[in-house]
Amino acid sequence: MPRPHARPGSWHAAAWGGLISALTAVVTPLHAQCSSESGLESAPLLELYTSEGCSSCPPADRWLSSRVAADPSFTALAFHVDYWDRLGWPDRFARPEYTQRQYARVRAAGGRVSYTPQVMLPGKVQVDWRAGAADRLDRLPAVASLNMSVHSTGSVHEVRLDGVWLGAARHPDTELRVAAFADALHTEVQRGENAGRALRHDRVVLHLSEASVLPAQGAFALTTRVDADALAAKPSGWLAWIETRAALEVQQTLLLRCP
């Protein structure tokens, strides 16, 4: 199976005009807008690589759902990979780019084997979630001040990110990513290893932006538009993160849950 690298980004950095100072949420029948800004600390990003076609994955999916139920702000994403699709059950949430990210992270860590379910943290691509290795995750000092807002209509989600690096240190070779995710999704699996099982999923990645290269210092502003009709479900929220370009090691996150 090929192990492609993640693609370079297509967003363009622009001058940053200022951070929105308050968390807001406004909902109208036809339009919805919500926003969030970072604090002095940042939660690490937990990544679960899973598939509806994998009989070993439901316990990990349930574990992640339990974490989200206990803490709705739990900073995690479930990437459904596509290499199980040919074995009897095509996972509607699987995308090749999620598989590519899994391969790239394993390669960057010097590993050779990707598998499901696989739980990763910054700097770790093999986390024993069954033994409680991901039960207590320490927050880290923020490296940037971030604000994210999402304006949604019936057909388009427009995501805007404004940021500025904190302190005088330079941050070369970093990039920004944004993912739309959904919680409380259910699937009745008809074929494959999980045939006859009812599966629940949380923090399912519906859309992953291309990587946007960030300046080493100063401010940045990014905007992307996501076609709502192209998503497999309605987003429950959005998660943005800054990561190193080579190792894909996440340095800072910002979670936004929209009504």
Image: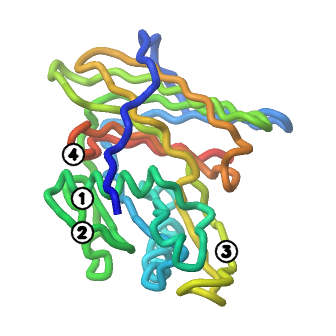
Local SS, label 1 = helix
Total marks in image:
4
Q: CA distance from mark 3 to mark 2?
A: 28 Å
Mark 1 = which residue? 106
**In the figure, is residue 11 to the left or right of 89?**
left
Q: Position of residue 186 (x, y in %)?
A: 67, 72
Image coloring type: rainbow
Q: Nearer the viewer, mark 3 or mark 2?
A: 2
Q: Residue furthest front?
A: 1
Q: Residue furthest bottom?
A: 196
Q: Earlier in the sequence, mark 3 or mark 4?
A: 3
Mark 2 = which residue? 113
Mark 3 = which residue? 187
The answer to the question of whether label 3 and label 4 lie on touching residues, with beta carbons closer than 8 A, is no
Q: Residues within 10 Å of mark 2 (few under 14, many from 20)?
A: few
The answer to the question of whether label 2 and label 4 lie on touching residues, with beta carbons closer than 8 A, is no
Q: CA distance from mark 2 to mark 4?
A: 16 Å
Q: Is residue 83 above or below residue 106?
A: below
* Amino acid at circle 1: Val
The answer to the question of whether label 2 and label 1 lie on touching residues, with beta carbons closer than 8 A, is yes
Front one among 89 and 14: 89
